[in-house]
Image (tube, rainbow, N blue to C red):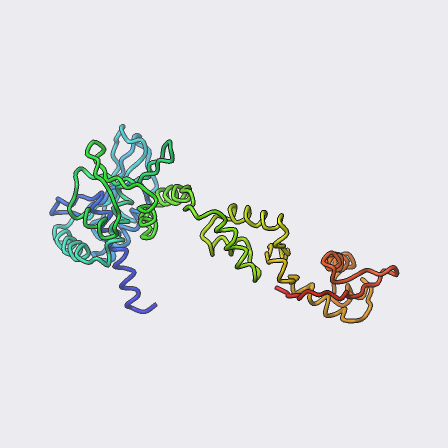
Amino acid sequence: MNNQKIKKDFNEKLAECVGLWLAEGDNKSNYEITFTNNCWNLIKLFHKTITKLFGKENIRIYVYNSSKKQIKIPIKAKVNYYLDKRATKPYYIWRLASSEFNKKWKIVTNKILSDEEYYCYVLRGIFAGEGNIKTGQHSNRTIRISQKEPSEFFNLLLNNFDINYTFVQNERSYVITGKTNWDKCAKIKIADLHPDKKLKFWQTYGEFKEEHYPNNYLRESILKVLERHHTSNGLSIKFNRSQARVYDILGLLKKSNKIQNFRVASIDYWIRKDQKIIIISKLKANYLNFLGDSIKTTKEFARYFKVDWKSSFRRLNELEKLSLVKRNKDKTWGKLNVDKKVISI
């Protein structure tokens, strides 16, 4: 990895940490850098990034819990334990005490915040700290970001990505709804920094109903592309539809006798019947090549391919179902003439 790429990656992590700090740090203090959270993934990211800038001296972790039970800390630092009976689960404050580093950190922060290139990373950090996903009845899916009051900079961040929002005063939150806005948030991976929020975001995003297409659009489009063979997964990706929806269409087309499927290595390949193509595995193609225009016994196949008799018989039986070979009365095998093209995958 070249130095330029390393620097770019670090600056992106730095921008995420700026977002985390804006969301859950004490940005009013002039004497320390702090970050409060209960997610160790975020705390470790913040620790690793900031100590790369300022070193590991004077780092403390303050642990707040409803009991006096000590908790294993995955960061090498001085640890202080405090009792907070209101805490439903432990939370932690990462602290670097230094007025000098605080001053330098604010210079770094201002530099990051003045560069649009890093806006998406800053927004990820803010969402990891203050964001949440709200779901409810009537397909209500809402992205919320807690803020005490509207912020000009926060408005700037959202406007930069053309995300429509409202600020709900009684909830003290920015509220984002609608499939179009979810699409924009998904594009910048707004929730990917926090593992739990990431999981809920993508699960909720996947629940949106697929965009409407004209009647029979998908059916006709799939039938057209099946001039060549495709898997259901390939079609799902190509048309941006769920595999379940694609299977429904394939089932209808097969029922109307317009397409057929060939199973190769546990994968179904679909193609239009009017293409007159049979799809087989490379192993079955080798069986056909070995058979050629001659007559052979199952034992000869087994000996040649170094497998047992049953294995060869199964392959030959599968070829017979495709009308490519025939088992004679004397239990030998011969190739059949077909008016279809045979391709192997």
Task: Name the residue rendered at 13%, 45% in the picture.
Answer: 29
Task: Name the residue rendered at 59%, 56% in the picture.
Answer: 270
- Residue 262: which quarter of the image? bottom right
Q: Nearest the camera: 343 or 17? A: 343
- Residue 258: which quarter of the image? bottom right
Task: Name the residue rendered at 36%, 43% in the picture.
Answer: 201
Q: Nearest the camera: 236 or 110? A: 236
x%, y% of residue 152?
Answer: 15, 46
Res. 41 in view = no
Quadrant of the image for the C terminus? bottom right
x%, y% of residue 148?
Answer: 18, 37
Left or right relative to 329: residue 213: left
Q: Nearest the camera: 316 or 104? A: 316
Residue placed farthest to the top in the image?
Answer: 85
Res. 177 in view = yes
Task: Name the residue rendered at 57%, 60% in the picture.
Answer: 229
Left or right relative to 239: residue 280: right
x%, y% of residue 143?
Answer: 30, 41
Residue placed farthest to the bottom in the image?
Answer: 293
Residue placed farthest to the right in the image?
Answer: 330
Q: Determine whether 51 is above or below 197 in the image.
A: below
